[in-house]
Amino acid sequence: MKTKRQKELIESFLSEIGDNLKPIYREIFEYLSSVGYNPHKQRSFIVFKHDLHNKQMAKTGIRKKQPFFDLRFSACRGFSKRFQDIVDAALSKQTDQEASCTVQRCDFCRGEPMTHVYISEGKTRCGAAALEIPNITAAELAEIKKLIDEEHAYLLKHEAEIA
């Protein structure tokens, strides 16, 4: 975290969650910050955006008295079954078959649509959305960091136009 206010924001959130989750969330937040995604208060949530492209990579907070963590990983491919299950669950709830960007009805994200949408069983969903990663464990930290790196590289190339 860069500023005293950002550190206080994170410490305040961490003080509200169980001791078993604190090191997991702290490690994720520190990693996001190390690649340039710093926390900002947005309503009752904390979002992590990058100064070079202002796109949201992650969001966290408390819902129904439980901490949650949402991660944007739509430009990533080849992730574990656990993360595919998260995509499948999210897409099973939507009624549309295709993300609006795949049929040229959206101009929010840059790059070829099929490179930045979530895909499940013939359905696609806009890649701008961060999906909730329920019940995060320490064993998933390496994959979460890998997903952050892949999505970050995509966003730098296509949104910030840095090769």
Image (spheres, rainbow, N blue to C red):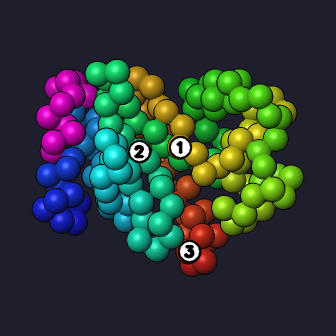
Q: Which residue is mark 1?
A: 130
Range covered by the magenta-colored residues? 11-21
> Residue under circle 3?
160
Q: Residues within 10 Å of mark 2 (few under 14, many from 20)?
A: many
Dot label at residue 59:
2
SS type, badge 3? loop
Q: Is residue 112 left or right of residue 129?
A: right
Counting from the top left corner in percent of width and height, residue 31 is at: 33, 53
Q: CA distance from mark 3 to mark 1?
A: 19 Å
Question: Is residue 61 located in the magenta-colored stretch of the structure?
Answer: no
Q: Main secondary structure of the magenta part?
A: loop
Callouts 2 and 1 close, C-beta under 8 Å: yes
Give how far apart the Cα atoms at labels 2 and 1 are.
Answer: 7 Å
Q: Is tag 3's residue or tag 1's residue first in the polypeptide sequence?
A: 1
Q: Quadrant of the C terminus?
A: bottom right
Q: Is residue 1 above or below residue 78?
A: below
- Is residue 6 toward the left or the right of residue 119 in the image? left
For marks 2 and 3, the one nearer the N-term is: 2
Q: Residue at x 48, y 55 (%)?
A: 56
